[in-house]
Image: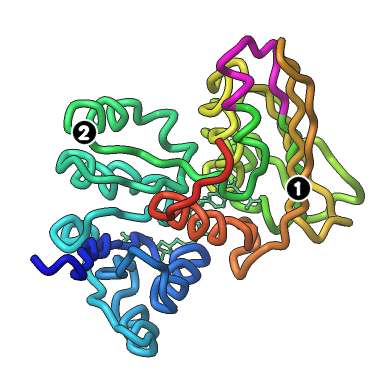
């Protein structure tokens, strides 16, 4: 080989499962160009509609069923309804590949996926998503954390349709002011609000687990942003932080969620890595 020849690693082929608020934005970023990555497939429920949209990308990719993704990619970004997590992630993990998981709540009830990743050398990556501070929580967890608390407050339309509300006959449409609608563990929160508080699950996985991480959920008709406040008491530090996320096209999902995935991909491949 000529001494001047540079070996360029092949870009990592990325599949996106779910072409909604997050999937669409991440696809756009990959199509615009993320060093080290190449978008190679998208799975969507409404394939003809997604295919029409994907045709507008600079480098259109096939729109396929979830089952076809693993053959087309080295890494999958799961950005689909929580119930599809195992179907999306398992083939990648069983092949020793990586899955970037947004439906973190579903992960709490799918511990077998972590075992699958362990057995085959795959990896599940849970990005910070709509939350902040997971770096400090993970660092504090190397010592002793005494307590972790999350208070989530959302505009009413960011919570509508949650199974917990339906099960308990809670109607939020006419509420006059900020109302606490849930108090319990992160595990219970994820079960009751699978499309609303994946942040609680991610926080619990970074820190002291889903049964010790305590969560409150508030509906507030005066709010325009999805607000998450965490407070942590540990032997190394005490900290509290809040984030006020601008909702995306999906009122349940903050815009920063997709940006977190893009930042996560850059962090996985770049020459400089900042943060825990
Ligand atoms: N970890 C975090 O901080 C956050 C996680 N999330 C979660 O991320 C996930 C994605 O969120 P969004 O993009 O806002 O949801 P979304 O509802 O906008 O998009 C999901 C997409 O999946 C598609 N889909 C449904 N069935 C499918 C199938 N069988 N095959 C392929 N696609 C299918 C839907 O048609 C929809 O386009 C959700 O589980 C959401 O709860 C959202 C916000 C923050
Ligand atoms: O986007 C947000 O504010 C949080 C969210 O939907 C989730 O954690 O599932």
Neighbour tally class for label 2: few under 14, some 14-19, many 20 plus, Cα within 10 Å? some
* Residue 211 versus residue 121 in the image, above or below: above
Residue 187: image x %, image y %?
Answer: 54, 26
Residue 115: image x %, image y %?
Answer: 26, 25
Residue 42: image x %, image y %?
Answer: 30, 68
Q: Residue at x 31, y 29 (%)?
A: 114
Give, as a single range, the part of the protein colored magenta. Answer: 138-149
Asked whether residue 143 is drawn in magenta, I would say: yes
- The residue at which mark 1 appears reads as 243
The span from disc 2 to disc 1 (Cα, nearest Å) is 34 Å
User: Secondary structure beneath disc 1?
Assistant: strand
Q: Return the residue nearer the eye: 95 or 168.
A: 95
Which quarter of the image is occupied by the C terminus? top right
Using the rendered view, name the quadrant where residue 40 is placed.
bottom left
Q: Residue at x 39, y 67 (%)?
A: 35
- The residue at which mark 2 appears reads as 121
Q: Is mark 1 within 8 Å of ligand 2?
A: no
Which quarter of the image is occupied by the N terminus? bottom left
- Circle number at residue 1: none
* Residue 111 versus residue 218 in the image, above or below: above
Q: Choose mark 2 or mark 1, whichever is in front.
A: 2
Q: Is residue 30 left or right of residue 164?
A: left
Asked whether residue 237 is drawn in magenta, I would say: no
Neighbour tally class for label 1: few under 14, some 14-19, many 20 plus, Cα within 10 Å? some
Colouring rule applied to residues:
rainbow
Q: Is residue 103 left or right of residue 139?
A: left
* Residue 44 versus residue 273 in the image, above or below: below
Q: Which of disc 1 and disc 2 is earlier in sequence?
A: 2
Query: CB of mark 2 within 8 Å of CB of mark 1?
Result: no
> In this view, which residue lies farthest toward the left?
1
Q: Residue at x 65, y 62 (%)?
A: 251
């Amino acid at each position: 080989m000529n001494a001047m020849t540079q070996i360029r690693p092949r870009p990592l082929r990325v599949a996106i499962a779910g072409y909604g608020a997050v999937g669409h934005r991440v696809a756009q970023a990959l199509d615009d160009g993320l060093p080290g990555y190449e978008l190679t497939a998208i799975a969507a429920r409404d394939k003809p509609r997604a295919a029409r949209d994907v045709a507008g990308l600079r480098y259109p990719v096939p729109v396929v069923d979830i089952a076809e993704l693993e053959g087309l990619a080295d890494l999958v970004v799961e950005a689909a309804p929580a119930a599809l997590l195992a179907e999306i992630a398992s083939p990648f993990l069983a092949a020793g590949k990586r899955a970037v998981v947004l439906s973190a709540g579903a992960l709490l009830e799918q511990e077998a996926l972590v075992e699958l990743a362990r057995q085959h050398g795959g990896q599940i990556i849970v990005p910070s998503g709509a939350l902040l501070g997971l770096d400090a929580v993970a660092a504090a967890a190397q010592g002793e954390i005494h307590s972790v608390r999350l208070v989530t407050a959302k505009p009413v339309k960011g919570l509508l349709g949650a199974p917990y509300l339906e099960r308990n006959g809670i109607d939020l449409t006419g509420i006059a002011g900020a109302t606490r609608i849930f108090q319990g563990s992160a595990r219970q929160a994820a079960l009751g609000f699978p499309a609303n508080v994946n942040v609680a699950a991610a926080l619990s996985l970074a820190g002291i687990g889903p049964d010790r991480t305590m969560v409150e959920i508030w509906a507030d008709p005066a709010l325009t942003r999805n607000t998450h406040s965490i407070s942590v008491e540990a032997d190394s530090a005490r900290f509290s932080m809040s984030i006020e996320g601008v909702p995306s096209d999906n009122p349940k999902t903050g815009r920063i969620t997709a940006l977190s995935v893009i930042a996560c991909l850059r962090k996985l491949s770049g020459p400089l890595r900042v943060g825990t």
